[in-house]
Image (tube, helix red, strand yellow):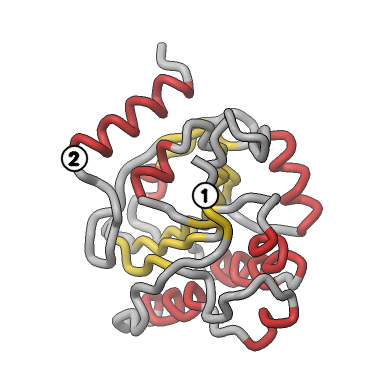
């Protein structure tokens, strides 16, 4: 029986072998299976046929905290849920790093923020993040029902950790979902992510 650690190592090895990194719009989203905050395995394949948002996060990052303090991230999570979009929040901070959070710690923090993802995932070896070449927290991906990446990049166009800037920011994930769910091409499909470096 595979442990979460061995599964993560296998995922990373497979990603390296297939070159499934630096996912750009139009490319297939790499498969992954990691555990949620309760220890239940969650796989991208579980949501085949649905739009999926991947949000890389770290509660220690001021850019992440600004999004949540302004209730900007929660607002888009709730809008996505209302459209039957699956939102997966992933903490890929490596378990050897001082900023690593356990499932219980992540669940508590997200509850305090009033967050509304479908699931909160813990990626202790950073394998899922490596498969997507996730660079920052936050770093966002939108995947279409066919399993293709249709957005990769920043959460919005205000590259700051200011809470007040969130009020005037253009949210790229909201725009991508609005385009895609209305049957339109995603106008802005790729941007440069900003935030704290992901703690591999």
Q: Nearer the viewer, residue 138 or 151?
A: 138
**Residue 198 numbered mark, or none:** 1
Query: Which element type, helix, strand or loop, lies under badge 1?
Result: loop
Residue sitting at x 54%, y 68%:
80
Does residue 1 appear to the left or right of 75 in the view shown?
A: left
Q: Quadrant of the N terminus?
A: top left
Q: Which residue is mark 2?
A: 18
Q: How many numbered callouts?
A: 2
What's the residue at 32%, 42% (across, down)? Answer: 31
Residue in the image at 65% along x and 64% along y: 63
Residue 145 % position (x, y): 32, 60
Question: Which residue lies most toward the left here?
Answer: 18
Categorize mark 2 by other alpha carbons within 10 Å: few (<14), some (14-19), many (20+).
Answer: few
Q: Nearer the viewer, mark 1 or mark 2?
A: 1
Q: State which quadrant residue 81 falls in.
A: bottom right
Q: Where residue 51 sits: x, y (%)?
A: 40, 62
At x 64%, y 32%, the residue is 38
Which one is nearer the viewer's eye here, 80 or 158? 158
Q: Is residue 145 above or below residue 39?
A: below
> In terms of image quadrants, where is residue 116?
bottom right
The numbered mark, 1 or 2, whose residue comes first in the sequence reads 2
**Label 1: how many residues lie within 10 Å, few (<14), some (14-19) or many (20+)?**
many
Q: Determine the CA span between mark 1 and mark 2.
A: 22 Å
Q: From the viewer's side, name the closer residue of 162 and 131.
A: 162
- Tags 1 and 2 touching, CB below 8 Å: no
**SS for tag 2?**
helix
Using the image as rendered, state which of residue 44 and residue 68 is in the foreground: 68
């Amino acid at each position: 029986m595979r442990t979460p650690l061995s599964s993560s190592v296998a995922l990373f090895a497979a990603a390296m072998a297939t070159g499934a990194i630096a996912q750009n719009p139009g490319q297939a989203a790499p498969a992954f299976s990691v555990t949620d905050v309760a220890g239940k395995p969650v796989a991208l394949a579980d949501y085949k046929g649905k739009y999926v948002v991947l949000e890389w996060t770290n509660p220690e990052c001021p850019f992440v905290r600004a999004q949540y303090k302004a209730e900007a991230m929660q607002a888009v999570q709730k809008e996505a849920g209302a459209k039957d979009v699956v939102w997966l929040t992933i903490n890929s901070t490596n378990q050897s790093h001082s900023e690593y959070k356990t499932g219980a710690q992540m669940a508590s923090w997200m509850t305090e923020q009033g967050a509304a993802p479908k699931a909160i995932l813990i990626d202790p070896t950073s394998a899922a993040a490596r498969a997507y070449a996730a660079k920052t927290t936050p770093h966002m991906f939108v995947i279409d029902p066919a399993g293709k990446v249709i957005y990769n990049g920043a959460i919005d166009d205000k590259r700051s950790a200011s809470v007040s800037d969130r009020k005037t920011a253009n949210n790229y994930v909201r725009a991508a979902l609005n385009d895609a769910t209305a049957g339109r091409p995603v106008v802005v499909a790729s941007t440069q992510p900003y935030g704290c470096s992901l703690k591999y």
